[in-house]
Image (cartoon, rainbow, N blue to C red):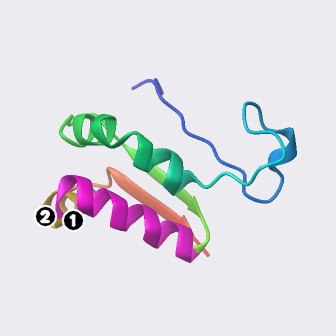
Amino acid sequence: GVIDRLHLAFSRDSGQVIPYPMQKVYIQDLLAKEEAELKELGHCEETAIYICGSLPMGKAIIDLLTASLGAEKVKAMEEKERIVKELW
């Protein structure tokens, strides 16, 4: 597969991130704005979602995915390792 979408957010050092200079940016907020895209990607069998960061951030993203896709879909994606989490 090929990465064709990548969403990045830097809440601690966003002064260097364009187009969001001098403002904290949270990935869960960016993804919430893309709910239609999340639903589309969630139903594509080739989609993989990698979540790396703090436990609270990871929970917020899983909650967002659950609200968008449903608990059963999120659980199935986790079981198939289509959602991978590295949280601390």
Determine which residue is flagged by label 1.
75
Q: Which residues are magenta?
A: 55-70
- In percent of the image, x 18 and y 59: which residue is there? 76
| Residue type, numbered disc 1 | Lys
Q: Nearer the viewer, residue 62 or 78?
A: 62
- The local crowd at label 1, few if under 14, some if 14 to 19, many if 20 or more residues have their Cα within 10 Å, is some
Does the magenta stretch mainly form a helix, a strand or a loop?
A: helix
Task: Kindly state the secondary structure of the residue where label 1 is placed.
Answer: helix
Query: As drawn, is 43 to the left or to the right of 83?
Result: left
Q: Nearer the viewer, residue 24 or 7?
A: 24
Residue 30: give x, y in percent of width and height. 52, 46
Q: Is residue 67 magenta?
A: yes
The disc label shown at residue 72, or none = 2
Task: Kindly state the secondary structure of the residue where label 2 is placed.
Answer: helix
| Quadrant housing residue 2 | top left
Q: Quadrant of the N terminus?
A: top left
Q: Is residue 13 above or below residue 8?
A: below
Q: Nearer the viewer, residue 13 or 21?
A: 21
The answer to the question of whether label 1 and label 2 lie on touching residues, with beta carbons closer than 8 A, is yes
Looking at this view, name the residue that lies furthest to the left: 72
